[in-house]
Amino acid sequence: MAEEQLSKWKGKESIESASITAEQVWACLEDFCNAHKWLPNLDTCYLVEGVPGQPGLVRYCASSKSDGHEVTIRWVKEKLILMDPIQRWLSYEVTDNNLGIKSYVATIKVFPINFDNGMKGCRIEWSYVADPFEGWKFEDFASHIDYSLKFMTKKMEHASLLMGQNLSTSAT
């Protein structure tokens, strides 16, 4: 347990989809301030400073939780470190939060896939390096990232069926 607390958490989760293309997924992800449209339990996400699509952009993301008596707001500020729209990947880091996160850097990559049946789809990879989070086990954090990635992909697939190509503007 002590060794787990001293070491960095490193991992990568991935998912493949035959329902959406890499271009469709990237259209959602490159709008760095729309995470609330795709991720579970995220109420808001908006630009704090910087230029959309440019390194240095900072977004504020928050969710609220009520225990019936009071509402707790959980929030993070995340800074876009790098973005490559040609290769379809971005990296970001948590710069401030009220969750006790000391260090967290993530990279999300989207790859096109041509399936044997002629369908075009994609693979999405979410990799991360973080200091251990107080009150969490690594396995629980990895499971959270995996769940978030699956949720996001399903939501984008559903939006694709409803809205066609322009997923970045849908908020289903």
Image (cartoon, grey):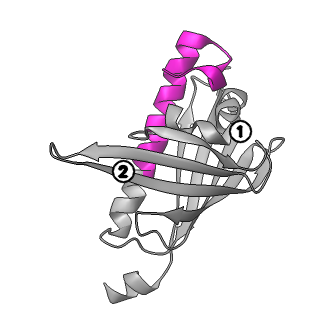
Q: Is residue 32 visible?
A: yes
What secondary structure predominates along the stretch shown in magenta? helix
- Who comes first in sequence, dot 1 or dot 2? 1
- Percent coordinates x, y for residue 86 in the rendering: 84, 41
Q: Residue furthest right?
A: 86
| Label 2 crowd (10 A; few <14 / some 14-19 / many >=20) | few
User: x, y percentage for residue 64?
Assistant: 34, 44
Amino acid at pointer 2: Ile
Label 1 CA crowd tier, 10 Å (few <14, some 14–19, many 20+)? some
Element at label 1: loop
Q: Quadrant of residue 16?
A: top right
Which residues are drawn in magenta? 145-172
Front tag of 1 and 2: 2
Specify the amino acid type for callout 1: Glu
Q: Which residue is mark 2?
A: 73
- Placement of 55 over or under 44, stated as above or below: below
Q: Is residue 160 magenta?
A: yes
Alpha carbon of mark 1 to alpha carbon of mark 2: how far? 26 Å
Mark 1 lies on residue: 30
Quarter of the N terminus within the rendering: bottom left
Does residue 44 lie above or below 62 as drawn?
A: above
- Residue ID at (35%, 64%): 139
Residue 158 lies in the magenta stretch: yes
Which of 160/81 is in front? Answer: 81
Between 57 and 153, which is closer to the camera in this rendering?
Answer: 57
Res 121 quadrant in image = top right
Task: Give the x, y percent position of residue 168.
Answer: 65, 26
Provide residue 51's location: percent of width, then percent of height.
Answer: 79, 45
| Residue at the image point whose x is 45% and y is 54% from the top | 75
Indicate the secondary structure of the residue bearing disc 2: strand
Residues at badges 1 and 2 in contact (C-beta under 8 Å)?
no
Asked if one can make out residue 38 in the rendered structure from this viewpoint, the answer is no
